[in-house]
């Protein structure tokens, strides 16, 4: 009778590793603003939408735990509707997470959106969150065990608590910005013999507990494998921001309007004429360096949420010139695209920036 070799647990883990090589590819344009007293609607696309088993928007207000809503597929787009933020709420943090049918996970970075009374008050109208065309009959919201059904700062309109089993998936990773847990059982079957597998997690955590049975069976016998895994934080290969923006960028500066009288040398004929800016550098510490030939001393900063500020230096005192200092504010919607607007001396300006190399 031929013997059966039982592989060590470490070997089984090595065999299992390809299952977790990559999670779903998430394409989401971050939003900068959400309108108070309306249902914000967030969208995402995935590299292989048919492979998505679950997608969620994790969110919270300025205080309290993370909550989530499920994203629903509408053609090639997945959408998630949040509860109405109250006008007293100033900012909403959120990110999108997804799990495919092979239990591989991924998530976006965390974003922060301002809550504004009306869409016209958003700095960049192109970065407004969508609004649900009709109030949902019931908006299922999940949260950690013991938390209030309605997140702090949000209206209870239409909100229904998620079933306890569903909400439990969000509670496991709340300490690390929300998340979901995953386990996979890997089996090897050869020559009528079965070798039980091991649990493989897509993340890690100090509170994770794994129980694994590894056994061998010979001949027609069967093997029973028992695997349990505590919820873990989601896996991510993202570079921590603001270092995630580091690289060489190019920009387009456009004059939207000119002050009357003009103070900074711009002319009405310059309005609407895009002006390219090459050699913009985003440094790992968040510094945005504009070429001195374009704007002397105009180094700005981008923070971990993608919000950026670039000061515009004015004419030096005593020079006899009239242009005062100004500023451009905006947000990066991804690690390769940023847009903002500002003013200087009454001139209104827009700026878009695109990453060209790491």
Image (spheres, grey):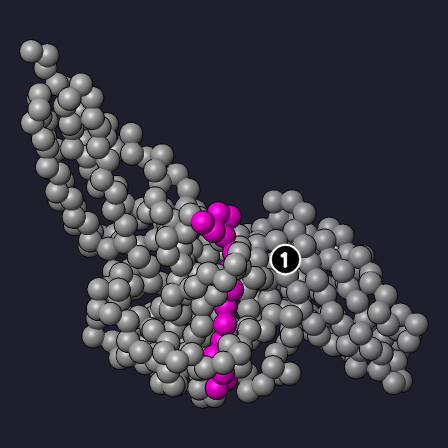
For disc 1, the marked residue is 337
- The image quarter containing residue 190 is top left
- Residue 51 is covered by the magenta coloring: no
Nearest the viewer among 134 and 283 is: 134
Please state the horizontal and vertical placement of residue 301, each as a whole percent of the image.
60, 63
Residue 242 shows in the view: no
- Residue 39 is covered by the magenta coloring: yes
Lateral position of residue 57 relative to residue 185, left or right: right
Could you tell me which quadrant the N terminus lies in? top left
Please state the horizontal and vertical placement of residue 335, each as a whole percent of the image.
57, 54
- The image quarter containing residue 170 is bottom left
Lateral position of residue 142 relative to residue 95, left or right: left
User: What residue lies at 10% left-to-right and 37% top-to-bottom?
Assistant: 224
Please state the horizontal and vertical placement of residue 144, each as a whole percent of the image.
25, 69
Lateral position of residue 354 relative to residue 145, left or right: right
Query: Within 10 angstroms of label 1, few (less than 14), some, or many (20 or more) residues?
Result: some
Task: Please tell me whether residue 94 is drawn above or below residue 87 in the rendered image.
Answer: above
User: What residue lies at 40% left-to-right and 55% top-to-bottom?
Assistant: 98
User: What residue lies at 15% left-to-right and 27% top-to-bottom?
Assistant: 194
Lateral position of residue 144 relative to residue 248, left or right: left
Please state the horizontal and vertical placement of residue 51, each as a whole percent of the image.
42, 47
- Give, as a single range, the part of the protein colored magenta: 36-50
- The image quarter containing residue 66 is bottom left
Residue 210 shows in the view: yes
Task: Please tell me whether residue 178 is drawn above or below residue 194 in the rendered image.
Answer: below
């Amino acid at each position: 009778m031929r013997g059966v070799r039982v592989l060590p647990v470490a070997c089984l883990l090595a065999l299992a590793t390809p299952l977790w090589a990559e999670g779903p590819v998430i394409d989401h344009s971050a939003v900068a603003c959400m309108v108070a007293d309306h249902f914000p609607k967030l969208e995402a696309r995935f590299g292989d939408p048919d492979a998505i088993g679950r997608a969620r928007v994790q969110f919270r207000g300025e205080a309290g735990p993370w909550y989530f809503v499920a994203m629903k597929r509408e053609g090639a787009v997945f959408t998630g509707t949040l509860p109405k933020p109250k006008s007293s709420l100033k900012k909403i943090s959120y990110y999108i997470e997804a799990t495919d049918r092979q239990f591989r996970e991924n998530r976006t970075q965390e974003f922060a959106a301002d809550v504004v009374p009306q869409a016209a008050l958003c700095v960049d109208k192109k970065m407004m969150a969508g609004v649900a065309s009709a109030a949902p009959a019931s908006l299922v919201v999940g949260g950690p065990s013991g938390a209030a059904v309605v997140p702090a700062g949000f209206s209870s309109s239409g909100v229904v608590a998620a079933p306890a089993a569903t909400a439990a998936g969000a509670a496991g990773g709340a300490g690390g910005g929300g998340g979901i847990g995953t386990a996979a059982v890997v089996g090897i079957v050869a020559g009528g013999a079965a070798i039980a597998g091991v649990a493989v997690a897509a993340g890690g955590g100090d509170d994770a507990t794994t129980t694994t049975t590894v056994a061998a069976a010979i001949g027609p016998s069967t093997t029973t494998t028992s695997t349990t895994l505590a919820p873990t934080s989601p896996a991510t290969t993202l570079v921590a921001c603001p270092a995630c923006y580091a690289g060489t960028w190019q920009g387009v500066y456009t004059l939207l309007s000119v002050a009357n009288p003009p103070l900074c040398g711009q002319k009405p004929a310059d309005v609407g004429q895009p002006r390219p800016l090459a050699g913009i550098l985003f440094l790992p510490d968040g510094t945005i360096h504009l070429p001195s030939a374009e704007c002397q001393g105009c180094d700005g900063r981008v923070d971990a949420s993608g919000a950026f500020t670039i000061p515009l230096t004015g004419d030096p005192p005593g020079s006899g010139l009239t242009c005062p200092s100004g500023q451009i504010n905006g947000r990066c919607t991804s690690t390769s695209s940023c847009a903002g607007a500002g003013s200087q001396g009454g001139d209104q300006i827009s700026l878009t920036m695109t990453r060209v190399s790491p």
